[in-house]
Image (cartoon, rainbow, N blue to C red):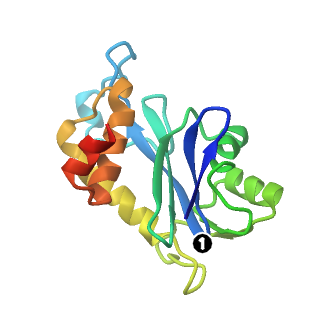
Amino acid sequence: MLSKTDRGNNRAVTILQGSNGRRSVKYLRGNRTHPKPPRRRWYEYGKKGISMMRGLSRWQLPIFTVADRSGARRFQRLSGRSNSTIQMALAPIVAPDSVLCTDGLQAYAAFAQYRGNEHFVIKTKPGQKTASATHYIQNINTLHSRYETFIKPFRGPASKYFEGYLRWFIARVSKVRPDEVLRAV
């Protein structure tokens, strides 16, 4: 992992090298000004409770997750999952010689083709978890599972505080000591 400084904003930009995994996860919104979802009638509840809608709805936010083999991780809230949004998020952090292992979203394939990166698609079907012994997205799936376990007690925090919760989660996953965090502030 290399770190360089962006001259325009004087902020640190992390460049992930080697084999990188990417996937998006959904986060339920928690803003009071947002309209509530329609309430179900009594006969629409099944034995297992309410089933979630497939994909992203207007009550969910996409979270962009990137990890590489050296242990560098990045969580970022995105406004959408369009090609341009994902290309803007990936361009500053992915090295040109890295290998992309993704979950099959078309925007990742377009980015890999545009930049000339090698791209492996791992579908999230029950039988397929790896493209080969060295190309997989299990570490991304594990991060998402740990994130869901971390955020569950908060019952969907407000969207305006969401970036802080992501930074807090990364600090906990990275095993940063509290005194190091306070020195950085």
Q: Is residue 83 left or right of residue 78?
A: right
Residue 138 % position (x, y): 44, 71
Compared across the picture, whether 121 is left or right of 182 comes to right
Kindly identify the residue that appears in the image at 39 percent across and 40 percent down: 27
Residue annotated with mark 1: 19
In the visual, does 135 lie left or right of 162?
Answer: right
Farthest residue, direction bottom: 133
Q: Nearer the viewer, residue 112 or 121?
A: 112
Residue 83, quarter of picture? top right
Q: Is residue 72 visible?
A: yes
Residue 173 % position (x, y): 30, 58
If the image is split into quadrants, where does the C terminus sit?
top left
Residue at image position (31%, 49%) is 169
Q: Residue at x 39, y 17 (%)?
A: 34
Residue occupying the far top of the picture: 33
Q: Position of residue 116 (x, y in %)?
A: 81, 63
- 73 vs 47: above or below: below
Depth order, front residue of 164/182: 182
Residue 51 visible to an observer of this rendering: no
What amino acid type should be assigned to the residue bearing mark 1? Answer: Ser
Q: Secondary structure at mark 1?
A: strand
On the rendered image, what quadrant is the N terminus found in?
bottom right
Mark 1 is surrounded, within 10 Å at the Cα level, by few (under 14), some (14 to 19) or many (20 or more) other residues, namely many
Position of 158 relative to 78 (above/below): above
